[in-house]
Image (cartoon, helix red, strand yellow):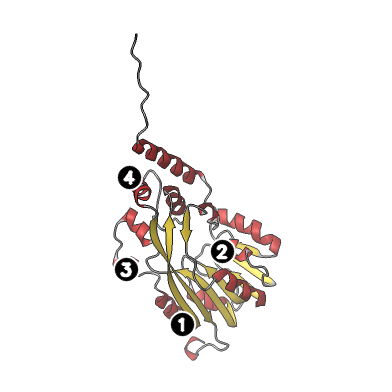
Amino acid sequence: MTGSSVPSVPSASDASDARFDTLVAEAGSVSVDGWDFSWLDGRATEQRPSWGYARAMADKLARAGAALDIQTGGGEVLASAPVLAPLTVATESWPPNIARATALLHPRGAAVVADSDEPPLPFADRAFDLVVSRHPVTAWWDEIARVLAPGGTYFSQQVGPESVFELVEYFLGPRAPEERGARDPRRARDDAEAAGLEVTDLRAERLRIEFLDIGAVVYFLRKVIWMVPGFTVGAYLPQLRSLHREIEEKGPFVAHSSRFLIEARKPEQPPAGLR
């Protein structure tokens, strides 16, 4: 009777490695165009700010005559409004997002303008009675004030300080104090007022995020490219493997986003020093 080999049984580590490879490959292959995060449904959760930006923005758009959405992304947030202003324009810099926003917004009668996200805005002075922006990379306050008509409103939800820094520092290590203090809403208020606007509302919240698997982390870092600049799976493979094991052993990776709402009004008559 001849001997026979016994098939090896995959270890728990082997199974974990296989799950890692599958999750990372899937998250690395999916499109990250636009600003729709629905791929993360069931993979990550995030609390929403209490003020309901999209709903409040839609209410203002329905009452505006001429509106501008700066850095619209793929146009998803603007397109969610049931009623747009009779004249609605959006700007965007990234070509894939320009195409996506155009497909969403042109059927609604809104124009999408390719713009570098650097001053000046490609519009005349006092062109809009409403300017909105969700998560602008930079708010160019002098330009916002310039294109607003007297009595017009700027309404924006922005990323606040130390947003998702638990994840950022997992990959990049501790951040410098000046980086941790960037995007302070109090600074936004000061800059808006320096541009001649009256800040009528300023609110800030920190919101819980849970990443349920490593695929969610890969997708998020591919999409939100400024979190870990130059992120690729290959460049951060050791950290990704370590975080995958941590999630499998301890549960979701928890981070906190930082958001603030700012609303500012352009006075009917500018202060004497700004005329």
Q: Are marks 2 and 4 in contact (CB under 8 Å)?
A: no
Q: CA distance from mark 2 to mark 1?
A: 24 Å
The residue drawn where x is 54% and y is 71% is: 52
Q: Position of residue 149 (x, y in %)?
A: 60, 81
Query: Which residue, given by chain and number where applicable, does mark 1 sit on?
Result: 193
Nearest the viewer among 25 and 33 is 25
Q: Which mark is residue 178?
A: 3
Query: Which residue, given by chain and number where applicable, does mark 2 sit on?
Result: 72
Query: Which residue, given by chain and number where applicable, does mark 4 sit on?
Result: 238
Residue count near mark 4 (Cα–Cα under 10 Å), binned few <14, some 14–19, many ≥20: few
Q: CA distance from mark 4 to mark 3?
A: 28 Å
- The answer to which of marks 2 and 4 sits earlier in the sequence is 2
Q: CA distance from mark 3 to mark 2?
A: 28 Å
Judge whether 184 appears above or below 108 on screen: below
The residue mark sitting in front, 4 or 3, is 4
Total numbered badges shown on the rendered structure: 4
Q: Quadrant of the N terminus?
A: top left
Q: Is residue 114 left or right of residue 10?
A: right
- Amino acid marked by disc 2: Thr
Judge whether 275 appears above or below 51 on screen: below
* Local SS, label 4: helix
* Local SS, label 2: loop
- Amino acid marked by disc 3: Glu
